[in-house]
Amino acid sequence: MIENTKQTVRIGFKRRKRRAQLATIGLVVLALFCMILMLVLGNTNYSLATVFDVLLGQKIQGASFAIGTIRLPRMLAGAFTGFALGLAGSVFQKMLRNTLASPDIVGVSAGSSMAAVFCILILGMSGFMVSFVACLVGLLCALLIYALANIGRFSTSRFVLIGIGMQSAIQAVISYMMVRANQYEVTGAMRWLSGSLNGIQMKSIPLLVGVVVVFTIVILLCERNLNILELGEDLATVLGVRINFYRILLIVSSVCLIAFATSVAGPIAFVSFLAGPIAVRLVGPGRSYALAAGMVGLILVLAADLLGQFAFSTRFPVGVITGVVGAPYLLLLLFGKRGKKGTL
């Protein structure tokens, strides 16, 4: 009897492992396909051979500028921004054990957006300083929400509700700055606030790549403790996890990812909200899905940008497309929670 049980457990483990491996491989292949399409498609379509020649440094009239100056920075920004949003969103949802605890729902992304809009419209700043201020303010917003939710005893529901309230207040501040800004600057700010990959230059990419790589490593090193935190605070304490230390470390790492991604491409709606649940469905329950969530976020951003550029007669920013996809899912999730518990 015991041997049969052990055999059943082994078979189930191997199936789940194989499913997770196949899902990860599929996500990588799909991500590479989207990245290639971003370089091939445009006002002028180029062959793969031409794309590779340009990437290897050959000078080809027209193609070198279109691919190397316009499409490559756009593709890299979309890829790393999407990965950062997907990974950070999955960490928030897993750590707080709530699918609504996404950075763009609980005010973290809004805090970074407010800082970036203030720097652009009021201070006339650009480049690294915008990223730095956006990261700092986003981090402060997240720590403030955490501190308020930690009064007495930490509550994930309180964290989500305080974050939603914070988001509303920050959006009011952003609206005020937009009303008071020079009308010639408002168009660019609105385009940025909708989440867009337009006009991204290669000089913005190295810092984004460095931040994403560093904090992805930090999150992966903490993933074992993250999995324990998902089991609940009491069990995590019994197992010897330093709850506040790892919770703050994971929040800081996720906020830095969100803030830098937001400072480059704007607040791309619902990517961090959608990536985790999609990754769980693909990889399967009981498996680590942090990297899979990052890959899903990457694919969502690149696919949405491709749709926004080529699927309609008018070109739409990537955030408009992800918003159209994400908003119905949020409503379904809210109604589902209400049907189960009678409350948010």
Image (tube, rainbow, N blue to C red):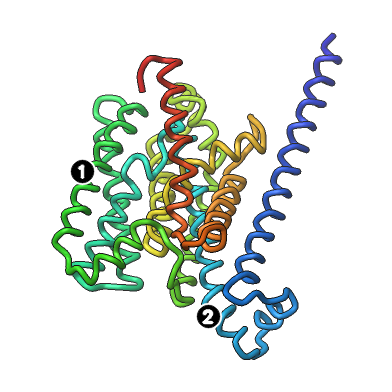
Foreground of the two, 55 or 8: 55
The residue that label 1 is drawn on is 169
Q: At which x and y percent is residue 344?
A: 36, 23
Q: Which amino acid does label 1 sit on?
A: Ala
Q: At which x and y percent is residue 110?
A: 31, 49
Q: Disc number at residue 69?
A: 2
Q: Which of marks 2 and 1 is nearer the N terminus?
A: 2
Q: Which amino acid does label 2 sit on?
A: Thr
Q: At which x and y percent is residue 98?
A: 44, 30
Q: Which residue is drawn at 46% across and 28% down?
A: 333
Question: Is there a contact, CB below 8 Å, between mark 2 and mark 1?
Answer: no
Lateral position of residue 209 relative to residue 121, left or right: right
Q: Residue at x 46, y 25 (%)?
A: 232
Foreground of the two, 203 or 35: 35
Lateral position of residue 239 relative to residue 331, left or right: right
Q: Residue at x 48, y 55 (%)?
A: 215
Is residue 213 visible in the rendered structure shown here? no
Is residue 171 visible in the rendered structure shown here? yes
Foreground of the two, 241 or 129: 129
Q: Which residue is drawn at 38% across and 49% down?
A: 252
Q: Disc number at residue 261?
A: none
